[in-house]
Amino acid sequence: MKLKVLERLLNIFFPMLCGICGREDFFSLRLGLCGECIRKTRSIRPLSRCDVCSSPLKEGSCCSFCDSRNVFFDRALSIRHRNDMLSEVLNRLKSRKDFPLSIFLASGSRKILRKLRSLEFDACVILPSHKKISWSSGKERPFLASSRLCKEAEDILEIPFIQPLLKSSPEKQAGKSFSERFFHAYRSWAIHPAWKDRCPERILLLDDVFTTGASVNEASRILKQNGARSVYVLTYLRTVD
């Protein structure tokens, strides 16, 4: 209650503008994105999805990709399908640390998280990314794009945030081909020594975008190798070909 009052006071003296075009309207004050830009984020929802990775399907219940590979996560869910506007929103959030944009990206997560309550997760985990070095301080950047999603999960599911995974490679997945992403993912993460063979049984793994699934699949493999029995994935965006 106190936070909502403080938020309203801040909007009076320091109104939250649209993180893309800079406009101020009813939506920007609450979501960090104006009504016109929000309309550009909308995409057509598929009638049928893969039961595992949520890819759009024309028929059946499992996509050919999930049916033909070792999938270590139990299910992957995303709030929205990625388009040009949503890509720009995510890029600005990550490059400029424009935190208000995460309010919009996380909107809709509460509905999904409430549906997941029955799974009784033990903890949520953010997939770690390579932390950039700040030239001014020489310290690692403590910013994670999925922090807002993690906060929603902690509040609604009443579970703690833990970080049993370590990023072991400085390389990024972006720019790599489909097959390169899977080879790179295999050597990109490792278990933290303190969590070896001690991971909670039911984990919700959070990331910003699901593209090929290589990153979250490898992270899920490591978590299950160290004690987890089920791993669900939730991301802001899902890339659809």
Image (cartoon, grey):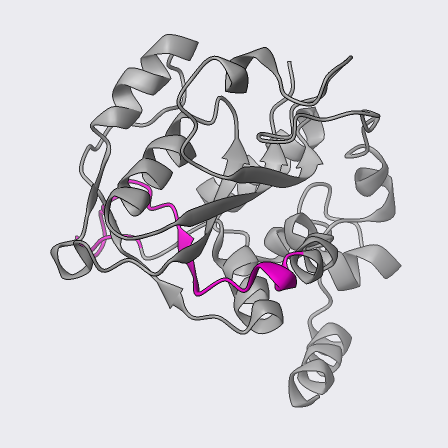
- Who's the residue at 48% across and 21% down the image? 212
- Who's the residue at 48% across and 70% down the image? 159
- Residue 195 screen position, x and y as percent: 20, 58
- Who's the residue at 53% across and 35% down the image? 209
- Residue 115 screen position, x and y as percent: 70, 57
- Which image quarter is the C terminus in? top right
- Residue 76 screen position, x and y as percent: 56, 37
Quarter occupied by residue 7: bottom right
- Which image quarter is the N terminus in? bottom right
Is residue 68 shown left or right of residue 198?
right
The residue closer to the viewer here, 185 or 82, is: 185
Q: Is residue 154 above or below residue 69?
A: below
The residue closer to the viewer here, 82 or 62, is: 62
Farthest residue in the left direction? 193
Quarter occupied by residue 175: top left
The residue closer to the viewer here, 54 or 36, is: 54
Is residue 107 shown left or right of residue 46?
left
Q: Is residue 77 above or below residue 184?
A: below
* Residue 177 visible in the snapshot: no
| Residue 3 located within the stretch drawn in magenta | no
* Residue 231 visible in the snapshot: yes
Is residue 184 shown left or right of residue 147?
left
- Who's the residue at 77% across and 34% down the image? 41
| Residue 136 located within the stretch drawn in magenta | yes
- Residue 135 screen position, x and y as percent: 22, 47
Numbered range of the magenta stretch = 116-141
Type of secondary structure dominating the magenta stretch: loop
Is residue 167 shown left or right of residue 93?
left
